[in-house]
Structures are given as structure tokens and as C-alpha cells.
Image: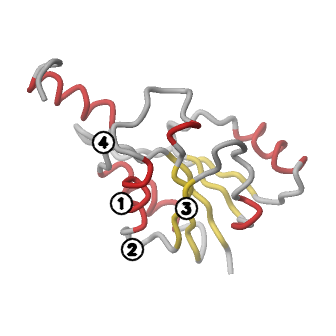
Amino acid sequence: MTRVLATGTFDLLHPGHVFFLRQARSFGDELYVLVARDSMIKHKAQPIVPEGQRLKMISAFGVVDKALLGSESDIFEPLKEINPDIIVLGHDQFFDTGELEKNLGERGFKAKVVRIDDAMKCELCSSGRIIKRVLERYGQNEE
């Protein structure tokens, strides 16, 4: 049985997330998803939706066998429990595939890293675009 791991912030869920998770699932028999902890997101703005709610949303997807929150200190820590065969990265995730495989190997993991270069094309297939649309429509100072 091939265990696949996908990771992400998954803020403001949109069809692009669904596309990514379906693509990730196609690489194996089981799909585990790590939802990024709020405290570990440093490469972009903090999520709108709290981590616990994002976890519940991802857990509800039928293609996801198990969703977990990531570690608050070491991104590799949850891999000890999951032990993935394949780690799938989305087209917009900032990890360098080769560097990630090297870091995994140094920690004793044998997972193959695959990047999905394809992305769903739609007007609001991006959390950033959703936020921009809301701000345009409702203004920055309104609740």
C-alpha cells in the first residue's frame, strides 16, 4: 500500500485545493494531509481561518484518509508517525524538491518527492485572489 502525504495551509478553501488533493491521491492508496500550524507559517501572511477549522475542513474531504496538524517546531516531526512513501508538493509550494529529498534522507526517510506542476485555472483558485476580491467588494475597513 502506497502512502501519500500532501501538505499545505489550506486557508479559504477553493477549487484549487480540491484539485491538488485529488491529484495527490492519484499517486497512492492512502492520502495523509498535514495542515500547517499558524505558528509555522512565515513565508506568507497569516491565515484567515484558524488551524483547527482548516483541519476540520480538510478532514471532511472524501479523498483524504487522515488529516493532521503539523508540528509547531519541526516540519519533519509528523513524518515519523505518517511514514509516507511519496510526498506531493503543489505548484505554488515554496519547497525545493531536491533540497527536501536531501533533508528527508538525512533524517532517515525514504519518501520520494513529487511536484504537481499543473494547477486548476479559475478566477478564484487562490486564497490571495479571494481575499483581494473581498477587499475590493467590501472595502478594507468594513467587517
Q: How far apart are marks 3 and 1 (CA)?
A: 11 Å
The N terminus, quarter of image: bottom right
Residue 73 versus residue 109 in the image, above or below: above
Residue at the spot 69% in from the left edge and 58% down from the top edge: 78
* Residue designated by label 4: 125
Dot 2 corresponds to which residue? 62
Identify residue type, mark 2: Gly
Callout in the foreground (3, 4): 3
Circles 2 and 1: CB atoms closer than 8 Å: no
C-alpha separation, residue under disc 2 versus residue under disc 3: 15 Å
Q: State the separation of the CA atoms marked 3 and 4.
A: 23 Å
Mark 4 element type: loop
Mark 2 or 4, closer to the camera:
2
Residue, x 60% and y 52% (percent of image)? 70
- Position of 45 relative to 5 (above/below): above
Question: Which comes sooner in the sequence, label 3 or label 4?
Answer: 3
Mark 2 or 3, which is nearer the eye? 3
